[in-house]
Amino acid sequence: MAQGYEVWGLVRGQANPRVRRVRELLGEVHLVRGDLLDQGSLISAVERVQPDEVYNLAAISYVPMSWQQAELTGEVTGLGVLRVLEAIRVCSGISASRSPGHAQIRFYQASSSEMFGKVRESPQTEQTPFHPRSPYGVAKAYGHHLTQNYRESYGMFAVSGILFNHESPRRGAEFVTRKVSLGVAKIKLGFERQLRLGNLGASRDWGFAGDYVRAMHLMLGMDQPSDYIVGTGVTHSVGDLVDLAFGVAGLDWRDHVVTDAAFIRPAEVDRLCANPAKAAEDRVRGAGHDDGRGRPGAVVGVRRARGGLVRLRRVVARARVPIT
Ligand code: F7E
């Protein structure tokens, strides 16, 4: 919005209690109704907003949930991508015989390092084959390939950003970074004695969400559509994170952390590490840190200036993504 964008967020459900929180946090964001499970509602949303860019960040994004609700994960995280792409295609009048014109809607798909799963090589590049380890990773791989397919089939400006873990103070408390930081605070303040965690041996390439949102925006501003890895190239274990967080509070994690089988996943992604060389080479990268207040929604659309004015519309669709 600071860049002159008009931002639209997609909200679903009747009397959705999260809408009030979005309004409190992001009062200038316009809201439009729609659901990734409902093709017609997405067509209506795109028709109403007339976005220049659409960013699909919507997903059931908590990986353990994807084993509990595998079908729903496939519907939202996988087929939801198809429905957004179809809404754009239909509203733009694109068909096998009619390519998009010059002022086409640009589409960003939030793909995930979880697609690499049981990694074939390290660090991972845009060429590394996928071996997803969860229904979430499988659904994301579908969305990634579909985005490429719509680009190749219809000439759409559709790009897939393969983002490694990205964190901020707004991250949900169920994800390990916030679970650890909040857990340490509660123990330090005497509210809790223990922190129950799963696999401390897993390693992730953690980056800052604010930077990665800038990278998404830059991707849609490229001359040609292309897919990019976004990550730091530095990996740490969950154990390292725990050790550091307790250390900052002057505590020894061994006195408080308990391994709980409930948080061990049926199949784990052991170690992820990005090779973001292509993004760096093409200058697709976030430009420094922000204050952490900017919260990505689920679908973002950008509209370029016409008649000298920069006007940006951004559709933020949330499908079962907790707003905290
Ligand atoms: O787990 C381990 C866990 O839930 C990180 C999502 O945004 O990033 C995120 O997926 C690691 C895993 O994130 C606990 O087993 C240990 O190895 O914070 P997480 P994630 O699964 O890596 C990717 C890129 C996405 O696309 C996803 O949408 O930490 N771990 N003990 C634990 N994880 C959790 N949540 N809770 C624990 O107690």
Image (cartoon, grey):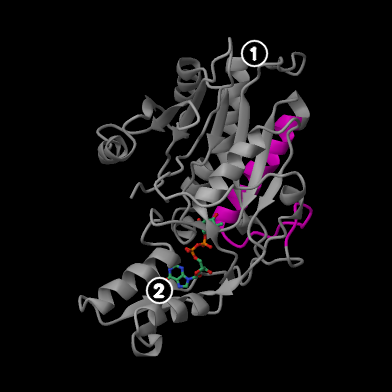
User: Where does the image place residue 275, in percent across and percent down from the top left?
Assistant: 72, 59
Q: What numbered label is drawn on residue 262?
A: 2
From which residue to which does the magenta span run?
Answer: 124-151
For this orientation, the residue located farthest to the top is: 307
Secondary structure beneath disc 2? Answer: helix
The residue sitting at 39% across, 89% down in the picture is 254
In the displayed structure, 190 sits above or below 322; it is below
User: Where does the image place residue 12, in percent across and percent down from the top left?
Assistant: 36, 33
- Which quadrant holds residue 100? top right
Q: What numbered label is drawn on residue 93?
A: 1
The residue sitting at 29% across, 72% down in the picture is 185
Horizontal side, residue 79 vs residue 153: left or right: left
In the displayed structure, 246 sits above or below 301; it is below
Horizontal side, residue 263 vs residue 53: left or right: left
How far separated are the C-alphas under marks 1 and 2?
Answer: 49 Å
- The residue type indicated by label 1 comes to Gly
User: Where does the image place residue 201, in percent across and percent down from the top left?
Assistant: 55, 79
- The residue type indicated by label 2 comes to Ala
Q: What numbered label is drawn on residue 70?
A: none
